[in-house]
Image (cartoon, rainbow, N blue to C red):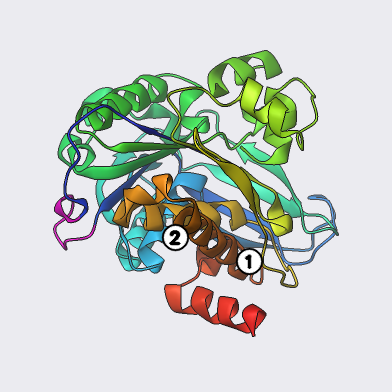
Amino acid sequence: MAQNRAPATPKDPGSNSQDGKALVVCFGEMLIDFVPTVNGVSLAEAPAFKKAPGGAPANVAVGVSRLGGSSAFIGKLGDDEFGHMLDDILKQNSVDNSGVRFDAYARTALAFVTLRSDGEREFLFFRHPSADMLLKESELEINTLKKAKVFHYGSISLISEPCRSAHIAALKVVKTSGGILSYDPNLRLALWPSAEAAKEGIQISEDEIVFLTGGDDPHDDNVVLKKLFHPNLKLLVVTEGSHGCRYYTKEFKGRVPGVKVKPVDTTGAGDAFVGGLLSSLASDPSILKDEKRLKEALYFANACGAVTVTERGAIPALPTKEAVLKLIKQVSS
């Protein structure tokens, strides 16, 4: 994940939302994950599935709100039962849904997620096309974008038109308003026309680094700095699951350890991490210049991911600030 500060006059962090908290705006897909009720089986072998709300940008929006921050989601849902259920979930979690639009002709996206015996996931998507792919630039909620202290997005909304153009237009609004840009590559090769198209469009977990660097050693800091870091980046973070994360800025680089727990389902862990980091960054962007405080924010984000893997699903498992602090206290005592 990378943050890019546009050259603009800094604003008061508390001036971007009505409740005095800095607003994190998340853009992209929201969908239904169907998760097997048992681990370690293929889709064909699964006896039953449990539906759970998901979609990486929406997960982050809920994650920020659960932690006590202010967030909004911008995206498109099908005008169907699932779409309205997802919209209700945003409202139930105090996420600003003024940027949500509904498509009368396309369905809400679905993803069947298999949980292997090691807790990792495999995906089967139903998007042919789904409503999230059809958001138009004319449907953007500009006022919400202008308020964004942080604008978070992934690569999936960059795959096809018209959503790609809407995405780029939204990004430009936030840059002009002086917001921080947060990008999670969120590699899902099955959704791209080809691996080459994905590499071009995505231009970060270890899997993504291996892909983006053409198979070079993902553990080599020099590889990361040479192939992924560039002068416009304020922060590059590489997540390593339970092992923690690595961070890179112009001034410093390092590693922050993970928080060990017994995993049940890794779905949503990365999004919980991002939500934890962005909630800290939105309230105090100066942590990007202070290595000690940045490491504290990253450890908090690691703990957010750790709490999430102890339950099934993405949004249902996202933690409160109290739950994260409790886990940190437990592991440090």
Amino acid identity at mark 2: Gly
- Magenta stretch contains residue 301: no
What number is the disc on residue 306?
1
Q: Is residue 238 visible?
A: yes
- Residue 113: percent from the left, percent from the top? 69, 50
- Magenta stretch contains residue 15: yes
Dot 1: element: helix
Local crowd size for mark 2, using a 10 Å CA cut-off: few (<14), some (14–19), many (≥20): many
Q: Residue at x 66, y 41 (%)?
A: 205
Dot 2: element: helix
- Residue 240: percent from the left, percent from the top? 70, 49
Q: Is residue 251 left or right of residue 103?
A: right
Q: Which residues are magenta?
A: 14-21
Q: Residue at x 18, y 56 (%)?
A: 14
Front disc: 2 or 1: 1
What number is the disc on residue 63?
2
Q: Is residue 106 left or right of residue 156?
A: left
- Residue 301: percent from the left, percent from the top? 53, 59
Asked if residue 38 is positioned above or below residue 75 in the image, the reply reads below
